[in-house]
Each structure stands twice: as C-alpha cells, then as structure tokens.
C-alpha cells in the first residue's frame, strides 16, 4: 500500500514514468538495473547539463561528490522521498531478484566504481545492499573517500551481527533522517 500511494503521488505531480532504473555495478562487476521511485523531473539530463555548463560552483560540487546539495532537478515529492529514503523502496525487487542484498555497499555506477581505485576489488566481491555501513555512518554528510572507506570496512569485517547492527541503525537513521539530503 505504501508503494502504491507513492506511485500515485509521483504520477499526480509529474506523470509517468513512476520508477527509474539506472545501470549499477553489482557482484563481480555484473551490471543490473537498480530501481528507484523517480524523484527528478523527466528532462533531468538536460537540466543537469545546462546547470553544469552555466554554474561553475555546481560543476565543481558535481565533480567532487557526484551529487548536488541544491539540485534543481528534484521534484517536490522527490525531496520528500529522498529525505525519508522512500525512493529506495523499489530496490526490494532488486533484492528479491538476487541482484542486491539487504545489507551491503550502496550500488554505484561504472563511473563511480572507478573512484574506488585499488579498493574496487572489495566493492566487487559482494552484492550491493539496500542499506549499509555508509548509510548509518553519516551518509551524505561524508566525503566520497569516506564512503569508499566505509564500504571497504564493511567488506573486510562483515558478519551476521554487523548486518543486524546496521539494520537496527538503519531504522534510527530513517526516523531521524540523519544525513539525508
């Protein structure tokens, strides 16, 4: 029911499509379509291209973080979905299809996995997760280098108790919206 209501709200605000599927790198380098509720305007590529061309500060932020703190592409319902992480709910289907685990490093794009350098082997050795150490350790309040370190630490130390701790911390992070932008 929650997913149906979110789909209806997205459709009412900005029409179809309701979900967005983006190519991400999974276990052993396999590429899969990571599902999310669409939180951006339909012409987001053109909006980003123009912004990066016209705004040097935005371009620098994008090159550094691969994110924009004040992203003009995000719809009003999209802001809410991202703050609450509800935009990630369709990834439960990725988990059911075996492309992701419930806990693991966040799925990254081919471009992003290159930023892992020598630590790329850590990332590729496990399935990405719906939640993970980075999400419960500051999320968007961290640098990309710190994110890579969190993913590396998770892979090196992972065990069922750690996964249970991450799941319990995820509930707290979701309720407090800690690190969500």
Image: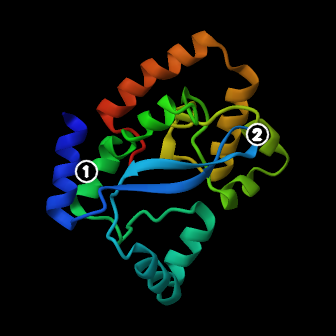
* Residue at horizontal 49 percent and vertical 37 percent from the top: 94
The quarter of the displayed image where residue 3 is located: top left
* Element carrying mark 1: helix
- Residues packed near mark 2 inside 10 Å, few (<14), some (14 to 19) or many (20 plus): few
The residue that disc 2 covers is 28
* Residue at horizontal 23 percent and vertical 49 percent from the top: 7
Q: Is residue 78 left or right of residue 101?
A: left
Q: Is residue 158 left or right of residue 14?
A: right
Percent x, y for residue 69?
42, 62
* Residue at horizontal 51 percent and vertical 81 percent from the top: 52
First in sequence: mark 1 vs mark 2: 2
Residue 52 numbered mark, or none: none
* Residue at horizontal 43 percent and vertical 18 percent from the top: 168
* Element carrying mark 2: helix
In the image, residue 26 above or below residue 58: above
Q: How is the image coloured?
A: rainbow
The quarter of the displayed image where residue 98 is located: top right
In contact (CB < 8 Å): disc 1 and disc 2: no
- Residues packed near mark 1 inside 10 Å, few (<14), some (14 to 19) or many (20 plus): some
Percent x, y for residue 158?
68, 20
The residue that disc 1 covers is 80
Whether residue 136 is visible to the viewer of this picture, yes or no, is no
Whether residue 167 is visible to the viewer of this picture, yes or no, is yes
């Amino acid at each position: 029911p929650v997913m149906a209501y979110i789909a209806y709200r997205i459709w009412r605000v900005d029409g179809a499509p309701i979900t967005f599927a983006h190519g991400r790198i999974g276990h052993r380098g396999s590429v899969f379509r990571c599902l999310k509720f669409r939180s951006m305007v339909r012409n987001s590529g053109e909006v980003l291209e123009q912004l990066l061309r016209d705004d040097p500060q935005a371009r620098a932020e994008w090159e550094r973080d691969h994110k924009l703190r004040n992203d003009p592409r995000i719809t009003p319902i999209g802001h809410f979905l991202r703050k609450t992480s509800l935009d990630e709910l369709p990834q439960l289907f990725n988990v059911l299809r075996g492309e992701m685990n419930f806990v693991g490093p966040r799925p990254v794009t081919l471009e992003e996995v290159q930023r892992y350098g020598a630590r790329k082997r850590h990332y590729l050795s496990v399935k990405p997760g719906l939640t993970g150490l980075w999400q419960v350790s500051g999320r968007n309040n961290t640098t990309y280098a710190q994110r890579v370190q969190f993913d590396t630490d998770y892979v090196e130390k992972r065990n069922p108790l750690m996964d249970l701790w991450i799941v319990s911390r995820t509930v707290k992070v979701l309720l407090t919206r800690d690190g969500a932008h």
